[in-house]
Image (cartoon, rainbow, N blue to C red):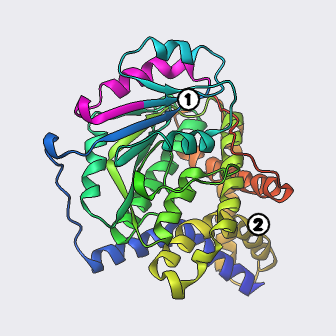
């Protein structure tokens, strides 16, 4: 029981806190990070902004306006919407907007198939992917392309920001806090060597390096970026380029997303299991296990083991009593957070415990879904606030 207890404690602590400390120290020891200058307009490369948008008419006008207002030379940017299978008038609307290209058709094949198809028509050296329900900051594209001056860089990912206000529900507050910490870890990963998985809200690649991804891939952005990293290229994180989006409408909608992401995580780990070989991949293996594998496949199962082992060790030392009380208090806060999850509660002390437990519950559901098989590259759309 003591072995189970302390091993679980170490893995949980390391996965969520320890790795951030270790990565930060390694970055400080290894070298001082230096900024790459933004090229002048005449030196900027041509790029294509690709936006998959299935039945996104409710946010399409805002996305079009945002895309056309980005600070990038108009003669060096192509804006391409992929609205294949949409039945909400997206095709007809985009036909009325000058300066916008689109790929449309009667059949919906899913996001990764939309990306595979769009890539066959792209001739620019850089392609940037962005979701239809996000807003990019004006300098995003310039901040991204500056990194391609380095020939070892195959991809650049932007930052995801969740829009919150003072009346944020648990959905938005929990998601927002999670992404702030995740952004810190990605910044450390990027400065150390490479990030291990990009967020599809804002993600760019060198067109020449793209290889089509399997049609049933759930986390296409993760697979594309990890395959680049496994080939020896770097995937850079650029927090100066960010995509802002509203949180999920409710915890039910957030649950759909998290279960889907968890299922995709297990699928990705199965397909990228060769990266677990440290003799071949070295530092990448360390980053991949520390930041992804432990989070997705180990700590969710350690949490109940830690609690059970702690219970059987009560009475042997005051440390066990203290940690059991701490666990009990944490889960009580999560329970209160669950009750108040759809209220406009401003006391955010309940958000982190509840969202933490919620994410791990989604991992179990995603794992069960993964074991059932039959994955699909078609996402079930989750409502946004």
Where residue 115 sits in the image (x, y, percent)? 55, 42
Where residue 291 sits in the image (x, y, percent)? 53, 67
Does dot 1 land on a helix, a strand or a loop?
Answer: loop
Where residue 227 sits in the image (x, y, percent)? 53, 65
If you read the primary sequence from the N terminus, does the residue marked by circle 2 or circle 1 appear first?
1
Taking the spot 40% from the left edge, 72% from the top edge, the residue there is 23
| Image height of 352 relative to 109, above or below | below
| Image height of 185 relative to 376, above or below | below
Taking the spot 69% from the left edge, 45% from the top edge, the residue there is 377
Where residue 274 sits in the image (x, y, percent)? 62, 76
* Mark 1 Cα-neighbour bin, 10 Å: few <14, some 14–19, many ≥20: many
Residue 372 among magenta residues = no
**In the rendered image, which residue does mark 1 sit on?**
53
The span picked out in magenta is 55-79
* Mark 2 Cα-neighbour bin, 10 Å: few <14, some 14–19, many ≥20: few
Q: Is residue 34 left or right of residue 107?
A: left
| Image height of 338 relative to 369, above or below | above
């Amino acid at each position: 029981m003591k072995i189970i207890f302390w091993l679980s404690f170490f893995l949980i602590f390391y996965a969520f806190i320890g790795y951030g400390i270790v990565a930060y120290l390694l970055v400080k020891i290894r070298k001082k990070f230096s900024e790459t200058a933004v090229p002048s307009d005449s030196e900027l490369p041509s790029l294509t902004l690709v936006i998959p948008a299935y039945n996104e008419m409710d946010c399409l006008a805002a996305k079009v306006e945002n895309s056309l207002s980005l600070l990038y030379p108009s003669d060096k940017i192509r804006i391409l919407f992929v609205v294949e299978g949409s039945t909400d008038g997206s095709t007809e609307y985009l036909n009325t907007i000058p300066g916008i290209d689109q790929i449309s058709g009667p059949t919906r094949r899913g996001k990764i198939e939309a990306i595979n198809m769009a890539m066959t028509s792209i001739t620019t050296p850089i392609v940037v992917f962005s979701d239809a329900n996000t807003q990019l900051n004006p300098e995003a594209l310039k901040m991204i392309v500056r990194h391609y001056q380095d020939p070892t860089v195959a991809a650049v990912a932007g930052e995801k920001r969740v829009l919150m206000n003072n009346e944020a529900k648990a959905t938005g507050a929990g998601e927002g806090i999670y992404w702030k910490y995740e952004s810190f870890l990605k910044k450390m990963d990027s400065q150390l060597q490479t990030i291990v998985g990009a967020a599809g809200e804002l993600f760019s690649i060198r067109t020449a390096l793209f290889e089509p991804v399997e049609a049933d891939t759930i986390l296409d952005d993760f697979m594309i970026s990890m395959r680049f990293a496994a080939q020896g290229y770097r995937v850079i994180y650029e927090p100066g380029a960010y995509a802002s989006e509203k949180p999920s409408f409710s915890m039910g909608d957030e649950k759909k997303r998290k279960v889907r992401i968890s299922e995709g995580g297990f699928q990705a780990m199965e397909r990228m299991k060769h990266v677990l070989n440290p003799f071949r991949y070295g530092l990448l293996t360390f980053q991949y296990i520390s930041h992804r594998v432990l989070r997705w496949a180990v700590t969710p199962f350690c949490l109940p083991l830690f609690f059970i082992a702690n219970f059987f060790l009560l009475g042997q030392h005051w440390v066990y009593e203290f940690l059991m009380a701490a666990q009990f208090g944490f889960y009580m806060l999560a329970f209160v957070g669950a009750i108040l999850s759809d209220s406009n509660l401003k006391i955010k002390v309940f958000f982190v415990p509840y969202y933490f437990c919620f994410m791990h519950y989604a991992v179990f559901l995603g794992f069960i879904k993964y074991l059932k098989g039959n994955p699909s590259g078609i996402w079930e759309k989750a409502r946004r606030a």
